[in-house]
Amino acid sequence: MNGVFITGSNTDVGKTTVGVEIIRHLSKTRKVRVRKPVETNCQLIDEAYAPKDAIALNEACSEPEPLSIVCPYCFELEASPEEASSHDGTTLSIDDLVSACNADTEDSFVVVEGAGGLYSPIADASLNSDLAKRLQVPIVIVIRDELGAISQALLTIEAAKKNKLSVSCVVLNAIQANNLCNKEALTAYTKIPVVSFSKKNLELFYSEIEGLI
């Protein structure tokens, strides 16, 4: 597979928001497919689940695909995919997710988004890190730009190294404006490129991310 795996230090750090902008930018010059193989906390609408993150990512592509391909595993329970699938009486395997990520992607750059943090359970007895290893693509680590971001970033980088995962970059997502100097501080502790993300300055983000992905 040619692509990247977007993960984070935790849930609610803005993986989808960052992923949407990565897809929009890369779609200008190449064919991009998105895979969000499993999503929980999905609302049931007209007898079909609506995976809101997968929908947002898919709509960012220049050529959106059917949601059944983008996100084939949807669950209503707000929990890890491992727990949500078990709650529905389903055994979701890592092989299921690998197959979903690789389906119809041969001629494309694939942006895969995980569920939760790098060590969050994503399938039966499997973590997000296990899926990234199986896909053999570099990862993008999204960290919420807040107090404590440096520790969160370094712990996630260490986890990636332990699992022999290649890290394209760390994205510091400024969900709320702050006066912290996390980017400058973090670069003193790691050689992994650190990129700032803000909806107010997307052009800078695009220029920085272009050479890293």
Image (tube, rainbow, N blue to C red):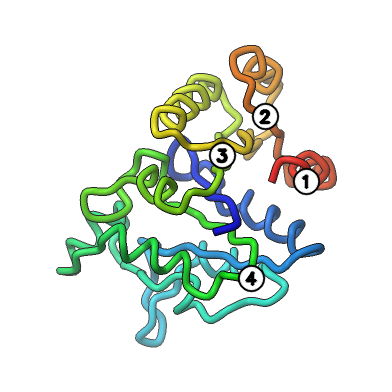
Considering the numbered disc 1 on the image, is that residue within a helix, a strand or a loop?
Answer: helix
Question: How many numbered badges does the structure rendering display?
Answer: 4
Q: Which residue is mark 3?
A: 142
Q: Position of residue 36 (x, y in %)?
A: 48, 62
Marker disc for residue 194: 2
The amino acid sitting under disc 3 is Val
Separation (CA) of disc 2 from disc 4: 29 Å
- Residue 212: quarter of image: top right
Kindly indicate whether the residue at mark 4 contacts the one at mark 1 (C-beta within 8 angstroms): no
Give the camera-side residue of 207 and 20: 207
Separation (CA) of disc 2 from disc 3: 10 Å
Residue drawn at 53 percent across, 81 percent down: 66
The answer to which of marks 2 and 4 sits earlier in the sequence is: 4
The answer to which of marks 2 and 1 sits earlier in the sequence is: 2
Considering the numbered disc 4 on the image, is that residue within a helix, a strand or a loop?
Answer: loop
Q: Which residue is mark 4?
A: 107
Callout in the foreground (2, 4): 4
Q: Which residue is mark 1?
A: 210
Separation (CA) of disc 1 from disc 4: 20 Å
- Residue 139: quarter of image: top right
Give the camera-side residue of 99 and 56: 99
